[in-house]
Image (cartoon, grey):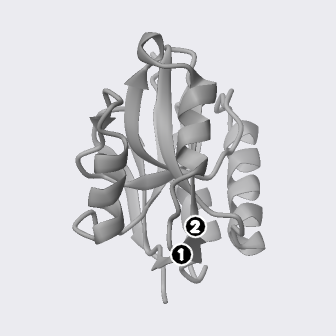
Amino acid sequence: MTYKSYLEIFVPLDTKRKWYSELKEYLSDVDVMWQNAYYHITMAFLDETPKDLEKITSMLKRHLTGFCAPVITFDSLDAFTTPSGLHFITLTSSAIPKEFVSLTDTVRHDIIDAGGKIESEFKPHVTLGRVRESNISLEYLQSKLRRFVVSPIELTLTEVDFRKFRGEVLFKTTLPI
């Protein structure tokens, strides 16, 4: 039996900062289901996980051991719509480090070579909240988000894990700073 899983890198987002409460107030006219915790960037979402987990975990160890924690400056907001009909409100960066993108591309390629199925593209973002598509148009939401100014937030991302979708952790590591 196959199952879904994902590789994620945690984003230590401090939601007690002023900009976050200002964003919530700014979007008070939108029915947002705000993310409560577990802020992360999904490096790979596996629609089907290979049966040979040892092959995946050893590959992850090989690629992640010694890889320095990326420092990412988050500086803008965006939104996109998922196939399930939700708009995701996201925190993004105009300059994702090339080394991080290259690592992600390599890991995704190796997962596919090991028999994993990845249907979605890598779109580096941090989900802040979700809005039902029927409540608001994507164009309106994106336009509104573009008008909100996010002061650059520089964060070091050190924690990576690979887990079953809504389930147990299969692999976890801390990247060196």
Q: Residue at image x 66%, y 45%?
A: 123
Label placed on residue 75: 2
Q: Is residue 167 left or right of residue 51?
A: left
Q: Is residue 48 above or below residue 17?
A: above
Q: Where 104 falls versus 166 (above or below)? A: below
Q: In this view, does 170 lie to the left or right of 4?
A: left
User: Residue 133 at x, y = what percent?
Assistant: 48, 16
Q: What residue type is labelled 2?
A: Asp
- Mark identifier at residue 69: none
Bin the neighbour count of mark 2 within 10 Å (Cα to Cα): few under 14, some 14-19, many 20 and up: some
Q: Do the residues labelled 2 and 1 touch (CB within 8 Å)?
A: yes
Q: In which quarter of the image is the N terminus?
A: top left
Q: Can residue 164 be seen in this view?
A: no
SS at badge 1: loop
Please name the residue that numbered disc 1 is placed on: 152
Residue 165 or residue 15, whichever sits in front: 15
Residue 42 shows in the view: yes
The numbered mark, 2 or 1, whose residue comes first in the sequence reads 2
The answer to which quarter of the image holds residue 145 is: top right
* Mark 1 crowdedness (10 Å alpha carbons): few <14, some 14-19, many ≥20: few
- Which corner quadrant of the image does residue 10 belong to? bottom left
